Amino acid sequence: MQLKSFLRSSSLGSCSSKRSSYSRNFDLPEDIVVPAETLDTGGEYVGGAMLPIFLNDLRRNNDNDLVEVTLELDDNSIVLCSVAPTPSHINDEGSEEGEEEAPPNGFLARSASAASKLRRKFSWIRSPSVMSRTSAAASEVSDDNFQPNTLSAREEMKSKLKLVRSKSTAQRALGGLRFISKTTGESDTNVLWKKVEARFHALAKDGLLAREDFGECIGMVDSKEFAVGVFDALIRRRRQKAAKITKIELHDFWLQISDQSFDARLQIFFDMADSNGDGKITRDEVQELIMLSASANKLSKLKERAAEYASLIMEELDPECLGYIELWQLETLLLQRDNYMTYSRPLSTTSVGWGQNLGTLNKTKNLVKRASYAFKCLVLDNWQRGWILLLWVMIMAGLFTWKFLQYRRRAAFQVMGYCLATAKGAAETLKLNMALILLPVCRNILTWLRSTRAKLVVPFDDNINFHKIIAYAIGVGILLHAVNHLACDFPRLINSSPEKFALIASDFDNVKPTYKSLLTGIEGVTGIAMVILMAIVFTLATSSFRRNVLKLPPPFSRLTGFNAFWYSHHLLAVVYVLLLVHGTFVFLVHQWWQKTTWMYISMPLLLYVAERSLRTCRSEHYAAKILKVSVLPGDVFSLTMSKPNSFKYKSGQYIFLQCPTISSFEWHPFSITSAPGDDYLSVHIRMVGDWTNELKRVFTEDDSSACEIGRAKFRERGNVDQRGLPRLLVDGPYGAPAQDYQNYDVLLLVGLGIGATPFISILKDLLNNSRSEELDSTTETSASDDSWTSLASSSMASTGKKKSLRTKSAHFYWVTREPGSFEWFKGVMNEVAEMDHKGLIEMHNYLTSVYEEGDARSTLITMVQALNHAKHGVDILSGTQVRTHFARPNWKEVFNKIASKHPYSTVGVFYCGLPALAKELKKLSQELTYKTSTRFEFHKEYF
C-alpha cells in the first residue's frame, strides 16, 4: 500500500506543549511483535512507537491502496486525527502507458477498507470522540457495501474545512471556545489554579469534590449546569462513572479546560454533547447541549425552541441524513460562522484605509504634547460652560465687592464692622442667584432658544447642572449671610456703647434692640423661616433622598423618593414670598429704590409663573386620546395616543405626562418614540416607581380583576372604548440634546436599556426623510423626461422644497441585559432592515446577559444564531433581521472604525443611559477628535 501522510503543524491548532496527565493503556493484538525500542520506560506502549508496525502491516496486505492519514504531533506523542481514501491515484511520474485504471468503485472500496482497518487498529490512541475526525465513509462503510456518493459529499465538506482553517479570517473562530478566560497565559493559569485550589479546600469533603460543586470551584458560579456538563465530559474521558473527584483529578481537569489549543477546547466541547462517547453526536445530543447553553445564558425562549434549532444544525451538517455528525463537522460550523453572517453590514467596511485616518493613534511619549492635547480637549469640551460660569462668577464678585465697599463707608460699619459688610455682600449675591435659579427650569423658553443661534454659545444641555451649581452658591450665600448676622454683627450691635449706637440710632427708632427683638422682628422671622424651608428643600433634593438610596423606617420612608423631592420643591413658592417681605423690611435701608430685592426677582419670577401657566393651559388643550396600550417584556409598556392638534415636535424631544386620577400635581418626562411625520404620538414607559406602576395599572387592568390585562378595553388601534378611561394630559414638547442630530454628517447613537427611546424616533425620522428624498428624486426625474417646460417647473419646485438631509450615516448601538427588551422596538428594527435601501442606518444590538462571543457557554448559541439567520433571515434572540451581539461593545474599536469609515466628517455622539458609560464615551470622543480628521461631539442625557 502506498501511504501519503499529512502532518498538521502546531500553528493550526495542535495541543499546547503543556498537556494534562491524562493517558490510556492499551493491549496489542497477539500477532504483533513489538521491538524493544518501541516500549516506553514505564512499560506502556505509546502511539509514536506503534505507528510504523501498523503501517507495515497495511502495506503487506495491500500495496495498491492509497489513503490520506492526518496526524497531530506533540512533544512526546502522535495522535491519529483522520484516515481517508484519496480521490485519485497518481504516481509521481504519471500513469504508465497501457496500464488500466481500476474502476472507481473498486478503488474507493479498497481504500475505504484500508482506512477502516487502520482506524480500527489505532482506536486505542484516541479518545472516544476523536474518532469523529475520521470521515463517515471510512468509518461506517464496510468493505462490501461502500457508498461513493456519501463519501464524496462528506469529503468535499472536509476539504472546505481545511481551506477555511488555513485562512486568516478563521483566526477569531480558532481563538474561541474559552472555558476559563479571554487571555489566559501559563502564568495566569497558575494564578487561577491557586484560587481553584483554595475553593477546592473550602468545598471538598473528605478530600473529594462533589460533581455539583465543580462549577463553583472552577469559577462558573453563574452557570453550574454547564460546568456539570464539562465535568461529565471529562469523567467520560477517563472511562469512569464517578460523582466525586480528588484534588489530583481536579488539577488534571483544570489543565484540560485551561489548554489554549483550539483543538483541545473543541474536543471538550464535542465530548460534552457526545454523552455516550461513541464519537458521534445525534440530534437529541445537540438539543441537550443547546438547552445547556441556553440555561447558562438565561435564555428561556431559546431553551423552548431547542428541538427546532437542533434539527436546523443536523440539516446543515448532516445532508446525507445519517443521523449523526462528527467532530470535524462541528468545527466546520464554527469556522463558517462569519460566512453565515453576511446579512449584517459590517461597520468596518470602508473605502478609506485605516492608516489614512488612524495613523496618529499611537500614544505619544512627549510630556509637552500630552499636556497640550489634554488642554485642547479641556477647552474644546468646556469652552461654552467656561464662559458662562466665568461671567456668572464675575458678576457675583462685582456685586459682592460693590455692596461690601458701600457698607464699608457707612456709619453702621463703625458699630458692626466687617461682619455687616460681609453679610450685605452675601445678600446681594443671594438676590442674583434666587433670580437666576428659575431660568434653567423654564423649559419652554429653553426649547425656543435651542432653535436660535444662542445654542452655538450657550450649553442648554447643562441647564440642570447650572441649576444645581446656583443652588450650591445659594447655600454658601445663606451661610455667610445668616452666620455673620446671628453670630457677629447682632451681638456687636446689642453690646455697642451708647456713643457708637448713636451713629445708627435713627435706623432703629432711637431704641437699642435686644437679641430677642432682632430675631422676633419681621426681618428675623422671615429670615429664619427661609433658612428652615430651604434646608428642607436642599436635603430632600440630594441624590440619597431623591433616588431612595437612604432607607428610612416607616413612616419616615415617605421622606425619600421622587415624590418627596417634587413636593418639597413647591415650598420654594413660600420662600419667594418671604424673600420679598424680608427685602422690604431690611435693616438700615429706608428708600424704596434702595430695596432692590424685588428688582432682581420680579422678572424671572414672572417668567416662571407664565411658564407654569402656559404648561397648565396647554396640558388641558393637549388631553390625549389613547389609541393603544401594549404591555411589553421587562416591565415596560407603551402608550400610543392621537397627536393633538397643532402639536409639533422634533425627534429626540420629550414630553411630560400627568394622570389626574393618580395625582393632580405629578408630571413625569418621557422621550417620544414616534417620528414627527407619524399621525400618532407614542412613548415607552418602564415601571420603576409608584407612579409608573400605577399608570400601567389604571390603563391595563379592569376594576373587576387585578391581574387581567385590559384586552376588552384596548383592541385595535383607533377602535378604543374611551368611556371610563382616566384622562392623560400631555405637556410639551421640550428640547433635549438629541434633537440637534440633523446638524451632523454621521450619528453614533448609544442607548442603554430604556435609554434607546429618544433614538428610536430619530431612526424613524431618518428613514422617513430618506424615503421622501427617494420619492422626490423619482418624481423629478420622471417629470423631466416630458418636456423642457416640465424640467423648468421641476427645478422651481426643487428650490422651494426643504433642505436635503445632511446626515448620511447613522450607527445605532443598543445595549441591554434582557432579551425580552428587543420586543420593545421589534417593528422599528424590521422596518429599517426592509426599507433602508441606501444603507443609511446600521443597527447593532448587544445583549449583556449572554457570555461574550468566544466563550464556550455561548459558542453553540452563536452557531445557531448564524445558521438560523442564513437559513431564515431572522435573529434567534431579537426576532428581527438585526444581528444580536453578545456581552458589551468594545467602544474604542467602535470609535476607531467610525473614524476610519468617515474621515473629515462631524460625528454627533448621543448617549442616553447611566452616567458610568458617559465618561468613557466622552473621553473617546475627545481622543479621536484630536488624533484623527474626524470630529466627535459628545452629548448625553441620563434617565
Image: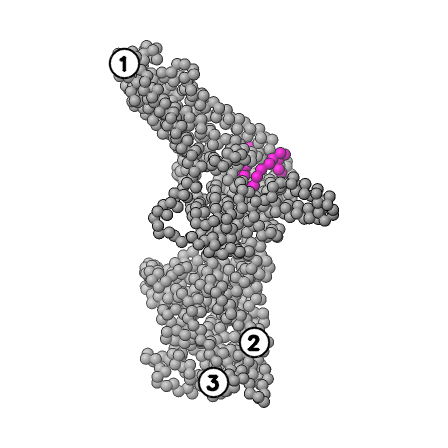
Give the spatial CA distance, label 1 vs label 2: 116 Å
Which residue is disc 1 drawn over?
500
Residue 626: image x %, image y %? 61, 38
Which residue is disc 3 drawn over?
58
> Is residue 933 at all visible to an observer of this figure?
yes
Q: Quadrant of residue 530?
A: top left
State which tag comes first along the sequence, 1 or 2: 2
Q: Do callouts 1 and 2 mark residues in contact (Cβ within 8 Å)?
A: no
Tell me which residue sits at (32%, 63%) in the image: 206
Q: Quadrant of residue 855?
A: bottom left
Q: Quadrant of residue 386?
A: top left
Task: Give the secondary structure at mark 1.
Answer: helix
Tell me which residue sits at (47%, 88%) in the image: 60
Give the spatial CA distance, label 1 vs label 3: 125 Å
- Residue 646 is a magenta residue: yes
Looking at the picture, the colour scheme in use is one colour
Which residue is disc 2 drawn over?
151
- Packing grade of label 1 (10 A; few <14, some 14-19, many >=20) is some
Give the spatial CA distance, label 2 vs label 3: 22 Å
Of the pair 918 and 672, the residue shown nearer to us: 918
Of the pair 250 and 441, the residue shown nearer to us: 441
- All told, the count of numbered labels is 3
Q: Tell me where the magenta segment starts and ends, as one range.
A: 642-662
Residue 280: image x %, image y %? 50, 71
| Residue farthest toward the front in the current orientation of the protein | 788
Task: Give the secondary structure at mark 2.
Answer: helix
- Residue type at mark 2 is Leu
Q: Do callouts 1 and 3 mark residues in contact (Cβ within 8 Å)?
A: no
